[in-house]
Image (tube, rainbow, N blue to C red):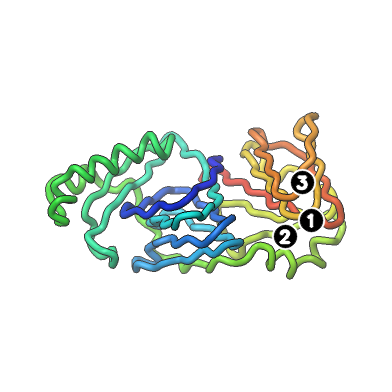
Amino acid sequence: LKVFYVGGPNVRRDYHIEEGEEFFYMLRGDMVLKVLERGRAKDVVIREGQVFLLPARIAHSPQRLADTVGLVVERERASHEQDCLRFYTDDTCSQVLHERWVYCKDLYHDLVPLINEFLGSEQCRTNRPGPGSFLGKPAYAENTETTLSPPFDLAQWLQRHDNLLSQPNAKRGLFEGKHQTKALVLGNGSHGSQCENTETFLWQRVGSAKVDVQGTKYVLAPNETLLVREPGLFTLINDVQGRTVALSMPPK
């Protein structure tokens, strides 16, 4: 998994497409995630305290204001997977100006040179597609069929499901529908590994939890996190009020 915090300001023109999903949470302030939903440009506003899961293969461009901080979780790429960095002629995203496909091991190392290439290109200067706009065929088709579920407030979600999560060994999926990502909220009691041979990100939201990772013991207080490395084996015991977000993103 790639787990990182992103601060603002970060206003960008490029769009990014990948084969995995992305998890967003806004710790401070709001952000706008520009996306193409069913082939049409749309702004998804993620407000402070809200979570959002972006499905795979959807073009997106995060826009962050000053003094904002957000959590992002995405998965490592398999060796055969390609990411796309794309620029459009305008905000309607109806015409592609420039795009490149690349294996992305490191976001900064692999994508920044592609951005700089575009900034020095004839396409950037004229805002018109040209011979250098496309260097090959797309690695895969974009997702033009999914209607996105809106962001929602995580604290309010926990409160709505408090009775369920207070039951012994209770847990519940955080997002509705089918997803690549396995996102669970672990409630009161004992819980085991949820996705073997895949890393799991544990994020303690409320109360405290005791975690055993193959004999190594940890205690998680509110807002503390733990990345359980492969093979992803752990046991977690929450107190009655304990609530833990557990994220796994198995390869496609």
Q: Earlier in the sequence, mark 3 or mark 1?
A: 1
Q: Is 103 above or below relative to 190?
A: above
How far apart are the alpha carbons under marks 3 and 1?
Answer: 14 Å
Residue at 57% over, 46% down: 249
Residue 172, percent from left and from top: 72, 60
Q: How many marks?
A: 3
Q: Residue 172 — which label? A: 2
Residue under the image location 34 percent in, 47 percent down: 84
The one nearer the camera, 126 or 196, is 126
**Frontmost residue, 100 versus 30:** 30
Query: Closer to us: mark 2 or mark 1?
Result: 1
Question: Looking at the image, which residue sits at the far top?
Answer: 215
Q: Are marks 2 and 3 in contact (CB under 8 Å)?
A: no
Q: Which residue is mark 3?
A: 221
x and y percentages locating residue 111 in the rendered image: 35, 40
Q: Residues within 10 Å of mark 1 (few under 14, many from 20)?
A: many
* Residue 110 placement: quadrant: top left
Residue type pointed to by label 1:
Gly
Determine whether, in the image, residue 190 is placed left or right of residue 20: right
In which quadrant will I find the N terminus?
top right
Tag 2 near tag 1, CB within 8 Å: yes
| Mark found first going from the N terminus, 2 or 3 | 2
Cα distance in 3D space between marks 2 and 1: 8 Å
Q: What crowding class fits label 3: few (fewer than 14 Cα within 10 Å), some (14-19), or many (20 or more)?
A: some
Q: Which residue position is annotated with label 1?
A: 187
Q: Identify which residue is drawn at 29% across, 40% down.
A: 114
For label 1, the SS is loop
Q: Quadrant of residue 173?
A: bottom right
Tell us which disc is closer to us: 2 or 3. 3
Whichever of callouts 2 and 1 sits on the residue coming sooner in the sequence is: 2
Mark 2 secondary-structure assignment: strand
Q: Which mark is residue 115?
A: none
